[in-house]
Amino acid sequence: MKVVFLEDVYGVAKGGDVKEVKNGFARNYLIPQNLAVPASHDALLRVTSLAEKADNERVKIMSDMQELADSINGSEISIEMRSGSNGRLYGSVNTALIAAELSKTSEREIDRKFISINDPIRELGEFEIGIRLHPEVNASIKLSVVSEDAPEEPIEIQSEDTSEPTDSIESEPIHSSTENSDDLENESTELVEEDQSESA
């Protein structure tokens, strides 16, 4: 079937192109998605305007995707997963999880189809993830897959110095009973001497 493409279909045609495609592809995908229409006389008259519209839309999309790539390129995200003692995950990190976390941190909607990983991630660690936003626009991010049970920050335990007193109040020195008795004897002697001097 010959169709006129209303907009770009990556890897197939650009907006305004007139191409022959398989009947099933046209009827089941292109036409229902409003990506193309049968190449009727009226549709062929619109080819020039459709091509111009597609060119303008292409420039806008490229600009938006480049802006997004610049904002997320080199960024870091973290995903918590349950794991065993050997670091293997109970489950896996797939493109949907990565896209959801990246959308949250970037505050932009990231489609899972933009995430480029060969296989789901099934172990803890750090990974470089490619982001293909457009055939001509790419970025990369750093993904950390951490255990749900892992503490966010290491806890520093300080050893106590047992040589220092634990209370802030200094204790009074304890005098021995011998020292107390000596003080009393000295005071008594001084009083006797004063009395004798007054009598004289």
Image (cartoon, rainbow, N blue to C red):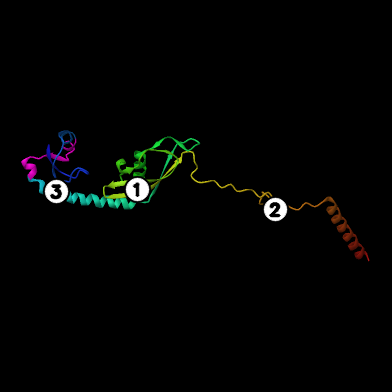
| Place of residue 54 in the rendered image (x, y in percent of width and height, measured from the top left) | 17, 48
Residue beneath label 2, please? 170
Q: For the point 86% across and 55% down, which residue is it?
A: 182
Residue beneath label 3, please? 51
Residue beneath label 1, please? 106
The Cα–Cα distance between marks 1 and 3, rounded to whole angstroms, is 33 Å
| Place of residue 146 in the rendered image (x, y in percent of width and height, measured from the top left) | 45, 41
Q: For the point 28% across and 50% down, which residue is it?
A: 137
Q: Is residue 170 above or below residue 82?
A: below
Q: Residues within 10 Å of mark 2 (few under 14, many from 20)?
A: few
Determine whether, in the image, residue 155 is placed left or right of residue 78.
right
| Place of residue 157 in the rendered image (x, y in percent of width and height, measured from the top left) | 58, 47
**Amino acid on which disc 2 is placed:** Glu
User: Helix or strand or loop: what does disc 1 sit on?
Assistant: helix
Q: Residue furthest left?
A: 41
Q: First in sequence: mark 1 or mark 3?
A: 3
Determine whether, in the image, residue 161 is placed left or right of residue 186.
left
Q: First in sequence: mark 1 or mark 2?
A: 1
* Residues tagged 1 and 2 counted as in contact (Cβ below 8 A): no
- Rendered-image quadrant of the C terminus: bottom right
Residues in magenta, as a range: 29-44
Q: Residues within 10 Å of mark 3 (few under 14, many from 20)?
A: some
